[in-house]
Each structure stands twice: as structure tokens, then as C-alpha cells.
Image (tube, rainbow, N blue to C red):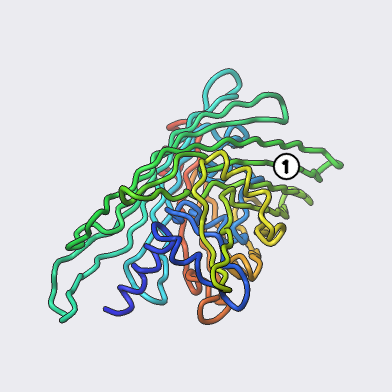
Amino acid sequence: MLNRFAIIGLGLLAAGTTDALAQTNVNGQKIAITTAVPFLRISPDARSGAMGDVGIAISADANAQYWNVGKIPFAKKKYGISATYTPWLQDLVPDINLVYLSGYAKFGKDDNQAISGSLRYFSLGDINYTDFNGASTGTGRPREYSLDFGYSRRLSTYLSTGVSLRYIHSSLITGAPNSGDTKPGNAVAGDAGIYYSRTTELNEDKAGTFSAGAVLSNIGSRISYSSTRRDFIPTNLGIGAAYTYKADMYNKITIAADINKLLVPAPESKDSNGTTSYFYPDKSVVSGVFSSFGDPAGIKRVNAAIGAEYWYQDQFAVRAGYYYEHKDNGARKYFTVGLGVRYTVFNLNVAYLVPSGSGITRNPLSNTVRFSLNFDFDNGSDFSKTRQDN
């Protein structure tokens, strides 16, 4: 019971009571920026999860709805569907998880346009509430979800862009007795992405593809869990680049890197009676975005990731990556590995996050195995062919 309430407490701190957390000082350093609905920044697919959470500029699939909606027109197939299951905090509790479903469909002249959508559902398990005497007072089911719809278009041979709209619902204290002035939070947000990709033929079998992208994600309203305060959602700026080298008709390798920065204001300091405390300023969304670039922590607020992917005959993939976050901004540092198998329209990806850190710096996904199922096809006959082959 103690562990369960500790987990929910962490979720509430991250999602609705940032002032209490921001007024502390850890080893003389300002603590990391926190926002509401942090589940929006959990990497949802096993392919990118195996590459250190790199995804802005790698080749497009159905999960581009999360990483960069602008790259969907560059997907090789006309239609795509993906489903991913991610256990969360598995080392502590068994029933916290993220489920992600996404898909796209291209249309128009030369399939130069696409519509896309996704559903992200985050469950914090079942909570048994008790009073101070340990007597049961009810059961709660904290849940959060977001629903997206996107549109993207190829602007030229090498360039495309896209936008998406998102509805966010966060119910963290459902079923809690005597919850007082609290309510589920709701917000509306959007993404805007741009993508560039160009392939150069090197000789008879060799080719190189350079890709780059940028995305503004979760640009939207603040979210409220009570009548007295509103919290920022994780508005983020991401920039990525990738290079794919096709050595011959059998071997292909991709190296990719992303950098990300939260566009929310950092804690500000206040001196009182010789004691320094930290608080989050009450600013508008636009003001918060611009003020985030004036954060005294500077480059410490930028997270970086690098990943690699090797394909053999476009059927078997091996992946690895590394994610880095400065110690003053959360201190998440971890390696990832993974595998992929492709058979006609079907693609299975598996990712594993290598345990790292200890205590409060231990990544909550340590030892977690994630699975993604992808289906990419041009028409119904692709499915018929798959059934016949089996």
C-alpha cells in the first residue's frame, strides 16, 4: 500500500502540484522543470524506443503521428497502422502502462497528402484508498488519455509539413474520498512539424539518404485540476537529423540524433529571511514559451539522444541508442537496444531499456521490454498475399 500511494503521489506532483516540488533545493541545484500530463512525452513505439528515443527524422511509419506529423507523406506505403504496449514503473508496481494506437492514410495526386490519427491511453492502475486507521474508503482508477487528428502534405520533392490537433483528458483522483476542490483536467493542444529528405545515388548499389526535421509539440492551453490554479502541459521543441547508408541490396544502416527542449518557464527564485525558495511563475502559454529561452540553466535544459539501426535485406533489424539528460534537469541517462522483423505488410519491433542509475536517478523503464506491431500496405491485396504466404 505504501508503494502504491508513493507512485500516485509522484504522479500528482508531476501533474498538479508543482509548486510544492519547485520550492525544494536538491544538492544546491535547481530541480528539473515539471509539467502536467507528463505521459505525453513518453516514447510510444518500440522502434524509436530501441534507438534511444530518437524519432524526429528517421524514416516515416504510423508512429510519425507522435514524432513528427510532417514526415508522413514520405512513408513508403499508402496506409499504416501501429499498436504499442509499454509497461511503466514495472520495477515498482505491475499495472501501470501506456497503450498507443496510431494510423495514417495517404491520398491525392501521387499520394502527396495524408491524414493521420492516434489514441494514447495511460493507466495508473487501481488504487485502494484508506483512512488514517487503515480502513478501506474506496477504490480509484486514475487514467489519462489523448486523442489526435493530423493532416500533412508534401510541398516539394524533398520537403513536407504537417499539423495535428490534440484533446487531452487527465483524471488522477477518480474515486478518491473527500477530494475537495479537485476535478479532472482537460486541455487542447496541437503539433506542427516539417521534414526534409533527399536520397543520393552513390553508385550501382550504394545510396545515401539525408533527412532532417523539426517539430513543435503540445502547443496549447494550460490544464487545471482545481478552481485555483492552472499548470503548463509539456510544450516541446524537437530537432532531429538522420543519415541512411545503403551499402548494397542486402545491408542498410541509419544513424540518427535528436535534441529536445521543453518550452515552459523554469522555476524562479525568491529570497525571504535569508532563505531562497523556488516557484513556478503564473504566465500565459505564449509568455511561457518565450521565457523558456531565457532560462539561466541554458544548455542544461536540452536533452539529447542518438541511435542506430541496421537492416539486413529489409527483413531483420538490430537497433541501439543512448539518451542523455543533464543532472540539473532530471539526470536520465540510459542505453537501449532492440530488434525488428518485417514480413510483407507485418512488422514486429521489440525494445529493451538497459538498467541504469540508482535511487532517484534510476530510470522508471529499466528492464522494461516494449512491443510494437506495425502494418504497412498499399491496398487490400497486400493482406490477401500475406494470408496466402502463410
Q: Amino acid at mark 1?
A: Ser
Question: Residue at 69% across / 48% down in the picture?
Answer: 240
Q: Residues within 10 Å of mark 1 (few under 14, many from 20)?
A: many
Question: Residue at 64% across / 71% down in the picture?
Answer: 327
Question: Residue at 49% across / 48% down in the picture?
Answer: 282
Left or right position of 197 against 109: right
Residue 302 lies, in percent from the top left, at 67, 57
- Inspect this view and state whether residue 273 appears: yes
Which residue is at the front of the view, 132 or 260?
A: 132
Question: Residue at 51% across / 54% down in the picture?
Answer: 41
Answer above or below: position of 163 versus 228. above
Residue 32 lies, in percent from the top left, at 57, 64
Answer above or below: position of 333 versus 84. below
Find disc 1 in the rendering and name its residue.
Answer: 211
Residue 382 lies, in percent from the top left, at 47, 36
Left or right position of 167 against 261: left
- Inspect this view and state whether residue 58 appears: no
Answer above or below: position of 255 versus 384. below
